[in-house]
Amino acid sequence: MQRRFVAWGAVLAMLSVGIGAFGAHMLKPVISEDYLKVYETGVQYHMIHALALILIGITAGQWGESARLRWAGRLLGLGIILFSGSLYILSITGIKILGAITPLGGVCFIAGWIFFAAEAFSRKD
């Protein structure tokens, strides 16, 4: 679990940098300023939660693996896909119905952080 979350976090962080660079250099002249802000929000949340996956992996190494940490990582990963992914596609295509998927990703982020906090609060040491 530890290596898997650290590895996936690193891959997702790398993708966040690449996707951000793509938006800054390729999309900026093509999409509206409003959609560029939407895209940048996706990149920001993508990177924050990729780093959080690395943190969960490191935490599992320190505290030991647990179901709560596993669920925290899974939910943050799913949140990146749903939240950031929907914002990327929305900003590039303009298909507004995709905005309905974004809150599901936000719920995944919140639930992932709740699992992480619950694990921290449950620790006796």
Image (spheres, grey):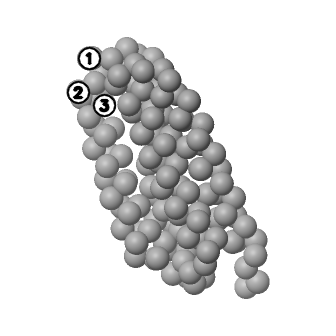
Looking at the rendering, in which quadrant would you find the C terminus?
bottom right
Residues marked 3 and 1 touching at CB (< 8 Å): no
Q: Secondary structure at mark 1?
A: loop
Q: Which residue is mark 1?
A: 29
Q: CA distance from mark 3 to mark 1?
A: 9 Å
The answer to which quarter of the image holds residue 115 is bottom right
Give the amino acid type for the residue marked by disc 2 in the picture: Met
Residues marked 3 and 2 touching at CB (< 8 Å): yes
Q: Which residue is mark 3?
A: 23
Q: Is residue 95 visible?
A: yes
Q: Is residue 49 visible?
A: no
Residues marked 1 and 2 touching at CB (< 8 Å): yes
Is 76 on the left or on the right of 50, as rendered?
Answer: right
Q: Which residue is mark 2?
A: 26
- The residue at the point 55 percent across, 74 percent down is 59
Q: Secondary structure at mark 3?
A: helix
Is 110 on the left or on the right of 33, as rendered?
Answer: right
Figure check: 100 above or below 108: above
- Pinpoint residue 84: horizontal percent, then vertical percent: 45, 40
- Pinpoint residue 10: horizontal percent, then vertical percent: 36, 61
Figure check: 102 above or below 18: above
Q: Earlier in the sequence, mark 3 or mark 1?
A: 3
Mark 2 crowd level (few <14, some 14–19, many ≥20, 10 Å Cα): few
Q: Secondary structure at mark 2?
A: helix
Q: CA distance from mark 3 to mark 2?
A: 6 Å
In the picture as drawn, the residue positioned furthest to the front comes out as 97
